[in-house]
Image (cartoon, rainbow, N blue to C red):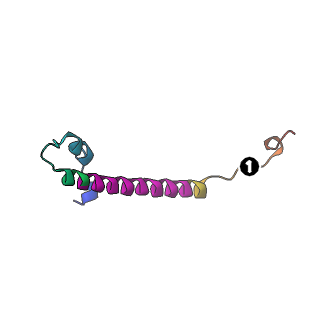
């Protein structure tokens, strides 16, 4: 079975991270964790933006052109 065909786990990693106790981490470890999380946020935002652009391009490609007719023009 391919990895993409497997069901997604119930809780995602972000949810698991949100419940982790942070007390054992040093100041430097917390800074590194923040840096890694910020990089992951940037990666996720970039992926979302590319997916949005891809979808918009596909919709524009397959959208029916507007029909021109006497009742489709401006009345001014």
- Residue at left offset 15%, top offset 49%: 25
Q: Nearer the viewer, residue 33 or 40?
A: 33
Residue 19: quadrant of the picture: top left
Quadrant position of the N terminus in the picture: bottom left
Quadrant position of the C terminus in the picture: top right
As helix, strand or loop, the secondary structure at mark 1 comes to loop
- Residue at left offset 61%, top offset 53%: 63
- Residue at left offset 12%, top offset 46%: 24
Q: Nearer the viewer, residue 36 or 15?
A: 36
Q: Is residue 46 magenta?
A: yes
- Asked whether residue 70 appears in the rendered view, the answer is yes
Q: Kindly identify which residue carries mark 1.
A: 67
Q: Nearer the viewer, residue 35 or 28?
A: 28
Q: Is residue 23 magenta?
A: no
Magenta stretch, main secondary structure, is helix
Note whether 72 is above or below 44 in the view shown: above
Q: Position of residue 48 (x, y in %)?
A: 43, 53
Residue 16: quadrant of the picture: top left
Q: Which residues are magenta?
A: 32-58
Specify few, some or many for label 1: CA neighbours under 10 Å numbering under 14, 14-19, or 20 or more. few
């Amino acid at each position: 079975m391919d990895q993409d065909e497997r069901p997604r786990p119930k809780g995602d990693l972000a949810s698991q991270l949100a419940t982790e106790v942070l007390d054992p981490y040093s100041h430097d470890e917390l800074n590194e964790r923040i840096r890694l999380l910020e990089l992951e946020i940037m990666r996720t935002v970039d992926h979302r933006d590319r997916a949005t652009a891809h979808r918009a391009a596909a919709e524009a490609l397959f959208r029916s052109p507007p029909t021109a007719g006497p009742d489709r023009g401006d009345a001014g």
